[in-house]
Amino acid sequence: MVRTSEDSKQGIQGLGVLVVEDSPVVAPNVHDIQTDLGCTVVGPAHNIARARELAQEEQFDVAVVDLHIRGDKIFPILDMLEARGVPFIITSGYADWTMPDKWQDRPRLAKPYTIDTLQNALEELVAAR
């Protein structure tokens, strides 16, 4: 049987996704893409403080986290997600993907990304859990 894009979408329907994204242009687009995929969006968090708050207090299955938030790197939030056992995708619009070795093997998406690339990344993340 050949899986269609609609069949694939079923695997992430209802998935709770924490979004950490500081761009006022990108954040609404990411929210809309995930909603179109049938996900439930938590956030978006536009700064580290809000990301920390959502990561501690909210329930979600996975996270899509921008590497650079307001000039800071997101590593403390990644530590929190890992401690909770929440898988995540790291995104960035910058060429600089410099990060500690422990995060080097984590899924990444270069911005801008499409609904298809985000869907594929989420499906892979869920399948790997």
Image: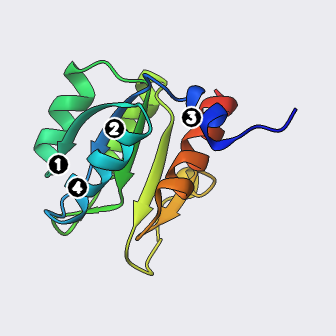
Q: CA distance from mark 1 to mark 4?
A: 14 Å
Judging by the rendered image, the residue that carries numbered circle 1 is: 48
Q: CA distance from mark 4 to mark 2?
A: 12 Å
Q: CA distance from mark 3 to mark 2?
A: 11 Å
Judging by the rendered image, the residue that carries numbered circle 2 is: 35
Q: Measuring 76% from the left and 37% from the top, which residue is drawn there?
A: 3
Q: CA distance from mark 1 to mark 2?
A: 23 Å
Label whose residue precedes the other's in the sequence (1 or 4): 4
Label whose residue precedes the other's in the sequence (1 or 3): 3
Kind of residue at badge 1 = Ile
Q: Position of residue 59 (x, y in %)?
A: 31, 18
Apparent side of residue 11 relative to residue 14 in the rendered image (left or right): right
Label whose residue precedes the other's in the sequence (4 or 2): 4
Judging by the rendered image, the residue that carries numbered circle 4 is: 27
Q: Measuring 51% from the left and 34% from the top, which residue is drawn there?
A: 87
From this viewpoint, which residue is outermost toward the right? 1
Label whose residue precedes the other's in the sequence (3 or 2): 3
Judging by the rendered image, the residue that carries numbered circle 3 is: 9
Q: Position of residue 105 (x, y in %)?
A: 63, 53
Q: Look at the numbered discs 3 and 2 and tell me whether their residues touch, using CB distance below 8 Å.
A: no
Q: Position of residue 88 (x, y in %)?
A: 47, 41
User: In this orientation, which residue lies closer to the viewer: 35 or 58?
Assistant: 35
Quadrant including the C terminus: top right
Kind of residue at badge 2 = Thr
- Disc 1 element: helix
Q: Nearer the viewer, mark 1 or mark 4?
A: 4
User: In this orientation, which residue lies closer to the viewer: 82 or 2?
Assistant: 2
Q: Would you identify the image quadrant in which residue 93 lies? A: bottom left
Q: Measuring 50% from the left and 61% from the top, which residue is drawn there?
A: 109
Image height check: is 97 above or below 101? below
Q: Look at the numbered discs 1 and 3 and tell me whether their residues touch, using CB distance below 8 Å.
A: no
